Amino acid sequence: MKIKTEIFIKDRADPFVMRGSDGYYYFTASYPMYGKDDPEGYDRIILRRAKTVAALAFAEEKTIWDEKNSDLSHRFIWAPEIHEIGGRWCVLFAASGSPDNVWDIDCHVITCEGSDPYNDPWIDRGRFTACEGDDFSFRGFSLDMTHFECSGKHYVAWAQNGGNSNVYLAPINPDEPWKTTAPAMLLTKPEYDWERVRIPVNEGAAALVDGGKVYLAFSASATGPEYCVGLLTADASADLMNPESWKKHNEPLLTSADLEGEYGPGHNSFVKDENGGWLMVYHSRDEVCFSGKCGYSNGDSLYDPCRSARIRKVVPSGETLIIE
């Protein structure tokens, strides 16, 4: 049976929620453009914080970094994620490497100078750096980077053009969370029909580590109602840089067909709520946008602000995740 889910935070795509060591929940997302002539949008990193996940919906939203103050990272700013890595606050995001080419997109990073990410200043470290000998990573359209820790090791996963938009994995040293320490490994590429609707895409990775398992969700297909969430799993004790350690599920985890009044679910993150239960925070479009009544449906979906953040409960269950 389909379950109706209310909008959590309107017009915020690629939502990311985490709980910091300071006890606060933090929310960030892509700051939207309202049509192609909008002089702003996709130009900053925003942050909210609150003591509970629900309170993030009403929390003050601050701009902690703006591309106009940078010589290294330029519009378009997509899919920021805030993480604590090795005791340091970092935001991973996609940005153009040049002010006059919005498609010069690669993974970038900023780090906080202090211990308060909501108020302290941030340093732009520019494009994420590949290890010596890796001539592929971050050298032409990479985005959607995430970080996770498993069995004491730290990893980043991201999407990159490798013929299609594929997801890659590499380890990092938490003392230097702006570069990889081994060449990238291809984790997943579009193979099944549900991953190749209109455009063959795998992107937007998000990891959940629980019960001796690693669950890595990713988004697939073009960004309309066909957008959906897929899943890979691995044992937490396995060599995660070995492709054979991962199992890719041949059916999607979440699609428009599973939802009532919302379309194109994707680009999610995972976080535990105050009671220890797992939540899946994702974006989708509502009925107004789907039916062409939002005012943006006839234009390029790149400039459509109608993707909003929503939340579903999720339960790790052996080789899969159960979404409630």
Image (spheres, grey):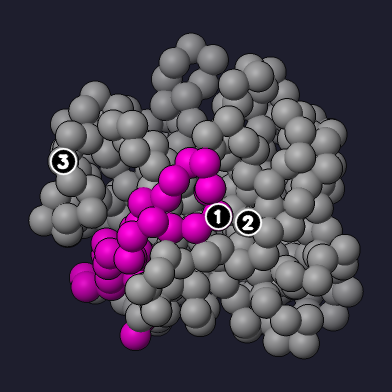
Q: Is residue 293 visible?
A: no
Q: Considering the numbered disc 1 on the image, is that residue within a helix, a strand or a loop?
A: loop
Q: Position of residue 45 (x, y in %)?
A: 75, 53
Q: Residue at x 36, y 51 (%)?
A: 171
Q: Residue at x 85, y 74 (%)?
A: 38
- Label 1 is placed on what type of residue? Trp
Q: Considering the numbered disc 3 on the image, is that residue within a helix, a strand or a loop?
A: loop
Magenta residues span: 163-192
Question: Looking at the picture, does residue 130 appear above or below residue 262?
Answer: below
Residue identified by numbered label 1? 178
- Label 2 is placed on what type of residue? Val
Circle 3 packing at 10 Å, graded few (<14), some (14-19), many (20+), is some
Residue identified by numbered label 2? 109
The answer to whether the residues at label 1 and label 2 have Cβ atoms under 8 Å apart is yes
The residue sitting at the top extreme is 275
* Image quadrant in which you'd find residue 161: bottom left
Nearest to the observer: residue 229 or residue 202: 202
Circle 2 packing at 10 Å, graded few (<14), some (14-19), many (20+), is many
Residue identified by numbered label 3? 238
Nearest to the observer: residue 184 or residue 158: 184
Q: How many marks?
A: 3
- Label 3 is placed on what type of residue? Ala
Question: Looking at the picture, does residue 29 appear above or below residue 228?
Answer: above
Question: Looking at the picture, does residue 62 appear above or below residue 201?
Answer: above
